[in-house]
Image: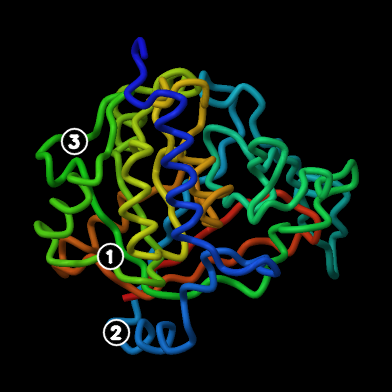
Amino acid sequence: MGDFELSAAEFRALYQRVKHMSQQGPADRRGALNNTSPTDVVTAASGVWRGHAVSLAAPIESQVAPDNPDPAVHQMTHTGTSSVPAAGLSFAMDRLAMNIHGNADSHIDALCHVIFDGTLYNDISADAVTATGATELSIEEAGGGIVGRGVLLDIPRVRRVPWLDPGDHVTADDLIAAEAAQEVRIEPGDLLFIRVGHRSRRTALGPWDVANARAGLHPAALELLAERRIAVLGSDGNNDTAPSAAEGVDFPVHVLAVNAMGLHLLDWLHFDDLVAVCEELNRWSFLCVIAPLRLRAGTGSPVNPIAIF
């Protein structure tokens, strides 16, 4: 097995287990979003008592960095310093061009994003992703928004460290320990967010090549999340650890979550503001609203999740 904790055979067995546990039927295209019911949404909304909203997204990056070699391009197309009439109406305007998937900007992965053994989620052929976009499982499946009870598990806080170092894994035991310490339990239909402290480390030490070194979930932890039947999974990293813990698979958590379990993944979120509110209120659950852009054939979307207390 070398440096891998899961052999190829062990990973395949894990893949089949979580896939079997997450089956929604052959016609399904929404995946784990089906785990959140209207009643769950109403219950989550009834817990709002402060009217305080907190963003879970990081500011969009427009500068080249070791973790962002091809950053977003923000351009002004009309400013207040040129061609402005002395009287009457004018507009300031700009445009944004960015990669949806990368290692810096907050985004959500659609169920068409991960191809494994030639198929997408629910054994849909990879041919469904064409040169003009995805004909199945695009981010439009979540175009009506994702709303439910958000839960934040802060792993560095439970371990009493500022962040997890690159290469470190969040295990199922870590998740259970965080539940106990924060007096919250992962329930079916939850929008689960797991903090590894990536943004805090990046702010303190500067950006680095996260493609080759980052903290994330151990693939075996996905079995617990399949048992709990969560609806969404997000992290301030990209959910996967690097180097990978699974032989022959560079992004095992993406494969298990998106391809096998039908989970929309949120990568590279920002939790510092959220943690401050959770600690102040001693409350680690909240109403959460996730609104992807309506890209009809998109494999994902930039995203700005909002927690409401």
How many angstroms separate mark 3 from mark 1 (CA)?
23 Å
Coordinates of residue 15 in the picture (x, y in percent): 48, 43
- Identified at 69% across, 61% down, the residue is 293
Q: Which residue is mark 1?
A: 186
Q: Which residue is mark 3?
A: 162
Q: Earlier in the sequence, mark 2 or mark 1?
A: 2
Coordinates of residue 61 in the picture (x, y in percent): 56, 37
Q: Quadrant of the C terminus?
A: bottom left
Q: The residue tagged with tag 1: helix, strand or loop?
A: loop
Dot 2 amino acid type: Gly
> Circles 2 and 1: CB distance less than 8 Å?
no
Q: Nearer the viewer, residue 284 or 223?
A: 223
Q: Which residue is mark 2?
A: 47
Coordinates of residue 88 in the picture (x, y in percent): 85, 70
306 vs 86, left or right, is: left
- Identified at 34% across, 13% down, the residue is 3
Q: The residue tagged with tag 3: helix, strand or loop?
A: loop
Q: Nearer the viewer, residue 24 or 76?
A: 24
Dot 3 amino acid type: Pro
Q: How many marks?
A: 3
58 vs 2, left or right, is: right
